[in-house]
Amino acid sequence: MLSTGVDIIEIPRIRQVLERYGTRFLQRIYTPAEIAYCRGRAPNLAARFAAKEATMKALGTGVRGVGWKDIEVVRQPSGAPGILLHGRAEARAQRLGVLEMALSLSHSQEYAVAFVVAQCQPKKP
């Protein structure tokens, strides 16, 4: 069984929120490792924001089911982006029988998009 999630966000919107709320915004949404990796770059922050939303959709929770920092975008050894789940997101994935999650990120000057595919154990009849 597969579960998917996709999200798109305007990069200028993330830039405006970052300018207005700064560290408060970063610490509410991103893990320390994500903050260090992005170094305040709006396109990278926007892509990770979209990835978190897409992951929430793939888990079937929406933004109320898990915390923002329960979902972390990491770099795999290959350099490709990956998802690392913590807390409530990890518990939800276990309940769903998620075996693996794949993440694809892209951005232009104006938009960032993320697509997540979760492979789940087949449900028993």
Image: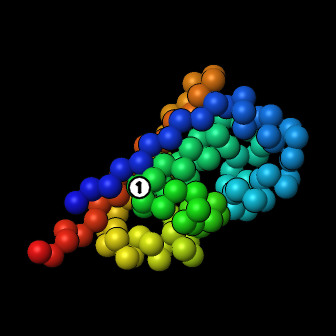
Residue placed at 77% from the left, 53% from the top? 26
- Give percent across and percent down for residue 32: 73, 62
How is the protein colored in the picture?
A: rainbow
Which quadrant is the C terminus positioned in?
A: bottom left
**Which of the 4 image quadrants contains residue 101?**
bottom left
Is residue 76 in sight in this rendering? Answer: no
Is residue 4 in sight in this rendering? Answer: yes
Relative to 41, is 96 on the left or the right? Answer: left
- Viewer-closest of 63 and 39: 63
Which quadrant is the N terminus positioned in?
A: bottom left
Instruction: Give the residue number, with chain letter if any, for mark 1.
Output: 58
Quick one: which residue is furthest to the top in this view? 109
Residue placed at 59% from the left, 41% from the top? 47
Residue placed at 48% from the left, 49% from the top? 54
Quick one: which residue is furthest to the left in this view? 125
Above or below, comparing residue 43 to residue 101 in the picture: above
Relative to 112, is 45 on the left or the right? Answer: right
**Hey, what amino acid is under mark 1?**
Ala
Relative to 53, is 39 on the left or the right? Answer: right
- Give percent across and percent down for residue 9: 60, 35
* Label 1 Cα crowd, 10 Å radius (few <14 / some 14-19 / many 20+): many
**Which of the 4 image quadrants contains residue 110?**
top right
Relative to 43, is 98 on the left or the right? Answer: left
Tally of numbered discs: 1
Above or below, comparing residue 87 to residue 104 in the picture: below
- Give percent across and percent down for residue 89: 51, 69
Query: Under tag 1, what secondary structure?
Result: helix
Residue placed at 67% from the left, 31% from the top? 11
- Give percent across and percent down for residue 80: 46, 48
Above or below, comparing residue 99 to residue 80 in the picture: below
